[in-house]
Image (tube, rainbow, N blue to C red):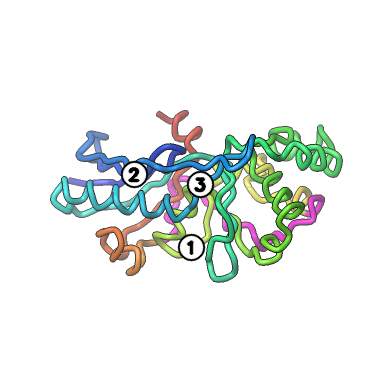
Amino acid sequence: MTILLGLDISTTGAKALLIDEAGRVIATHTTPQPISQPQPLWSEQDPADWWDGIAASIRAVLAEANHPEIAAIGLTGQMHGLVLQDAAGAVLRPSILWNDQRTQAQCDSMTAKVGFERLIQLTGNRALTGFTAPKILWVRDHEPEVFARAAHILLPKDYLRYKLTGEYVMDVSDASGTSLLDVANRRWSSEVVAALDLPESWLPRLAEGPEVTGVVSAQAAAETGLKAGTPVVGGGGDQAAGAVG
């Protein structure tokens, strides 16, 4: 019997789900996640809590199912949240979440620099406070010392991928919620990135949802109980996953 592991990092919990090839649930566990609102309109979480929570949930479902062989791991989760990492992969500040509303000034700046219609033409949306790009600009404007140390940008589920595999990868559905993706061509928009004066080198490799993006590392195996070498696929943001069903 083929067994698959699904991982979901939502705003409220870190969930692991074991299913068979017919979609029947074998085991599931959710570890609650804390959220911080240090100022009005702000909403943040610590990516370390995501990893601790998902590792705990993985260990729980593996124990419940008597440690079965896992064929592959899929990822989903809350979209838009900014994870900034330095060149060594260390997280530089708490993640600014999808429901954080501090970035209206940065959205106005994006619209002025790219153009309202052009931004929609390229990215599929106007500049929105919940999306990722204005969060990056906010860090540049308000935390320049953090911005100066940044080398990588990920989203919540893709930070879990990094912890599982050591790879910097983002699937295109989640990337579509960054305001940096050329959605028609399924690639980063060099035009938008240049207009915002952001380093394109910070952006991760793009992948399709079913694509294998890496394998579980020895370190992640030790922390979760998973088998090293287990494939991890691209997955999708929670809205895309919900649309599929």
- Say which element carries label 1: loop
Residue drawn at (47%, 36%) of the image: 238
**Foreground label between 2 and 3:** 3
Compute the Cα span from label 1 to label 3: 21 Å
Residue drawn at (82%, 50%) of the image: 195
x, y percentage for residue 221? 30, 63
Q: Amino acid at mark 1?
A: Glu
Compute the Cα span from label 1 to label 2: 18 Å
Q: Amino acid at mark 2?
A: Gly
x, y percentage for residue 200? 70, 59
| Mark nearer the N terminus (1 vs 2) | 2
| Mark nearer the N terminus (2 vs 3) | 2
Give the quarter of the figure containing the C terminus. top left
| Mark nearer the N terminus (1 vs 3) | 3
Residue drawn at (70%, 52%) of the image: 139
Residue placed farthest to the left in the image?
66
Residue 81 within the magenta-colored segment of the rendering: no
Q: Which residues are magenta?
A: 194-214
Which labelled disc corresponds to residue 45?
A: 3
Query: Circle 1 is placed at which residue position?
Result: 167
Q: Amino acid at mark 3?
A: Gln
Query: Circle 2 is placed at which residue position?
Result: 6
Dot 2, how many residues are within 10 Å of its Cα: few (below 14), some (14-19), or many (20+)?
some
Residue 207 within the magenta-colored segment of the rendering: yes
